[in-house]
C-alpha cells in the first residue's frame, strides 16, 4: 500500500527566505506526483504536476523535483511571502489505479 | 468559470439520517472523485468515476454510495449517517483518463453528524 509522508508538519519562516518542503512515498512505481496548496476553509489548488519521466517542474517562484528511485519529491519556494502561508500537500498517482494517495501536508507560515 | 461546484457547504445531520452531497463540474472532465479530509489523516479517497456509468471504490467506501449518470454530476450519498462520518468532503475532477492530469477541487462540504 502506498504511503505518503510530509515532514515537517508545520514550518514558520520569515519573509524573504527560500524554503524546501519534503514529500516521501513508499512505492516508486508512480505515474505522477502533484503538489497542492490549501488555504484555511478552502479546497485544494494544484500547483505543479510532475510526470514520472520528469525530474522537475517550475512555475514562477515554485520548483518541484522528483526522485523516483529514492521515493522523494521536494517543493522549493523562493523568496517566500506572507501570501504563501497555507498548507501544502503532495499526492501520488500509482500506475493506472486511478487512485491518488495524499500526504498529510505541511502547514507553512511566512511571517513579516 | 465555475469549475467544480459542491453543495451544500455546511450540513448538520442526526445519526441515522441520509443525505446527498452534490458535485457538478463544467469542464467536461471524465474523471471525478470524492475525498474526505480529517485532521491528522490527510485526504482519503471514498469513490471515483472514470466516466458516465462507471464508478469504483476508493480507500474508505463503506457507508457511501455514488452514481454517475452524466459527465457533469457525481453525487455522494450517505445512507445512514454516523458520527464517524463527520468530516470535510471534497469533490475533484480531472481532464485526463484515470485522474492522471491536474486535479481540480471544489470548495468542500463540511458535514457534522450528531
Image (cartoon, rainbow, N blue to C red):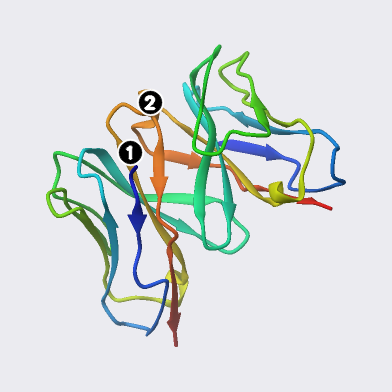
Neighbourhood count class around disc 2 (C-alpha, 10 Å): few under 14, some 14–19, many 20 upward: many
Whole-percent x and y of residue B8?
76, 42
Q: Where residue A107 sits in the image (x, y, percent)?
A: 46, 70
Tags 1 and 2 in contact by the CB under 8 Å rule? yes
Q: Give me the C-alpha separation between circle 1 and circle 2.
A: 9 Å
In terms of image quadrants, where is residue B102? top left
Residue A102's disc is none
Q: Which residue is drawn at 34% across and 75% down?
A: A80
Element type at marker 1? strand
Q: In this view, does A49 lie above or below B71?
A: below
Closer-to-camera residue (B34/A85): B34
Determine the secondary structure under disc 2: helix
**Disc 1 with disc 2 on a shared chain:** no
User: Where is B32 relative to A90, above or below?
Assistant: above
- Residue A89: image x %, image y %? 41, 57
- Quadrant of the drawing holding the N terminus of chain B: top right
Image coordinates of residue B44 in percent, x first then y, are 51, 45
Report the residue at 85% width, 38% height from top. Answer: B16
| Tally of numbered tags | 2
> Which residue corresponds to mark 1?
A93
Residue A92, quarter of picture: top left
Does residue A61 appear to the left or right of A102 in the view shown? left
State the residue at coordinates (70%, 50%): B84
The subunit carrying tag 2 is: B
**Crowding near pointer 1: few (<14 within 10 Å), some, many (20+)?**
many
Q: Is residue B22 visible?
A: yes
Q: Residue B98 carries which label?
A: 2
Q: In this view, does B7 lie to the left or right of A59?
A: right
**Chain of the residue where label 1 is placed in the rendered structure:** A
Q: Look at the image and tell me whether residue A64 can be seen.
A: no
Amino acid at each position: 500500500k502506498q504511503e505518503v509522508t510530509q515532514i515537517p508538519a508545520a514550518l514558520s519562516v520569515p519573509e524573504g527566505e527560500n524554503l524546501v518542503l519534503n514529500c516521501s512515498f513508499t512505492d516508486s512505481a508512480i505515474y505522477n506526483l502533484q503538489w497542492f496548496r490549501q488555504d484555511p476553509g478552502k479546497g485544494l489548488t494544484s500547483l505543479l504536476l510532475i510526470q514520472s519521466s520528469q525530474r522537475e517542474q517550475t512555475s514562477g517562484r515554485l520548483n518541484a523535483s522528483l526522485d523516483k528511485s529514492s521515493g522523494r519529491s521536494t517543493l522549493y519556494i523562493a523568496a517566500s511571502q506572507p501570501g504563501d502561508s497555507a498548507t501544502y500537500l503532495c499526492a501520488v498517482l500509482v500506475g493506472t489505479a486511478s487512485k491518488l494517495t495524499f500526504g498529510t501536508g505541511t502547514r507553512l507560515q511566512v511571517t513579516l | 468559470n465555475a469549475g467544480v461546484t459542491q453543495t451544500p457547504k455546511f450540513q448538520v445531520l442526526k445519526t441515522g439520517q441520509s443525505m446527498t452531497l452534490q458535485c457538478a463540474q463544467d469542464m467536461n472532465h471524465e474523471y471525478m472523485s470524492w475525498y474526505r479530509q480529517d485532521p491528522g489523516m490527510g485526504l482519503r479517497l471514498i469513490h471515483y468515476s472514470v466516466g458516465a456509468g462507471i464508478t469504483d471504490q476508493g480507500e474508505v467506501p463503506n457507508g457511501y454510495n455514488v452514481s454517475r449518470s452524466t459527465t457533469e454530476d457525481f453525487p455522494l450519498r450517505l445512507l445512514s449517517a454516523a458520527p464517524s462520518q463527520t468530516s470535510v468532503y471534497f469533490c475533484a475532477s480531472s481532464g485526463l483518463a484515470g485522474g492522471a492530469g491536474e486535479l481540480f477541487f471544489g470548495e468542500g462540504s463540511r458535514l457534522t453528524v450528531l
